[in-house]
Image (cartoon, rainbow, N blue to C red):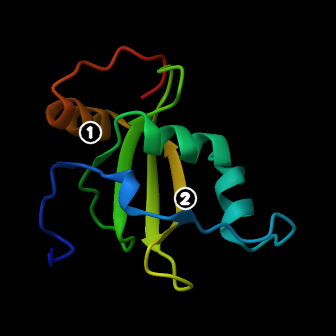
Amino acid sequence: MARTRNEAVFTVFDAYEWEAIDWDDPDDADGNYAHCKRHGVTETVVRDVLRERPVEITLRPTWSDFVIAGPDRGWSTLWTVLFDRSPKRGDWLRPVTGWWSKTAEVRQWEAITTRSWRGRHG
C-alpha cells in the first residue's frame, strides 16, 4: 500500500508478515540495539509490542516506515516503537527508537483497538 508521509494510517499491525527483527551487534554503541536500549526499548519490549495487540499509528513528522503502539506483555506500559524495513532483507523489521506512549498515541491505540488503556504508563 503506497502512502505519503502525512497520510493518516489506522490499522492493526500484522507482525506475522515479518520474518525477523534486525538488531545490530549489542557492542556497537552507534547501532540500533544500543540506541533502543538507552530509551528503554529492549528485545523483550519489541517482542511484546509486536505480540500484544500492535497497531500502526500516525506520528508527525516521522521518517520511519512504521510507527507501532502496543502494550508490553503485562499490559502495564503502552509503548510507541518506530521501525524501518531492514536494508538486509525486505521481510525483516528494524527497530529505530521508542518510548512510553504519549497521550495522543494512547488515544490512537484506543480508537483502533476499541479498548480503553488502563496501564500505568502511556
Please tell me whether mark 2 sits on a helix, a strand or a loop: strand
Residue 80 lies, in percent from the top left, at 43, 46
The residue identified by callout 1 is 104
Q: Quadrant of the C terminus?
A: top left
Q: Amino acid at mark 1?
A: Ala
Name the front one of labels 2 and 1. Answer: 2
Q: Nearer the viewer, residue 63 or 113?
A: 113
Looking at the image, residue 2 sits to the left or right of residue 46; the answer is left
Tell me which corner region of the image, top left, top right, bottom left or bottom right, holds residue 113. Answer: top left
Q: Amino acid at mark 2?
A: Thr
Mark identifier at residue 97: 2
Q: Quadrant of the N terminus?
A: bottom left
Residue 96 lies, in percent from the top left, at 54, 65
Q: Residues within 10 Å of mark 2 (few under 14, many from 20)?
A: many
Residue 75 lies, in percent from the top left, at 47, 21
Looking at the image, residue 33 sits to the left or right of residue 107; the answer is right
Please tell me whether mark 1 sits on a helix, a strand or a loop: helix
Residue drawn at point x = 45 percent, y = 39 percent: 51
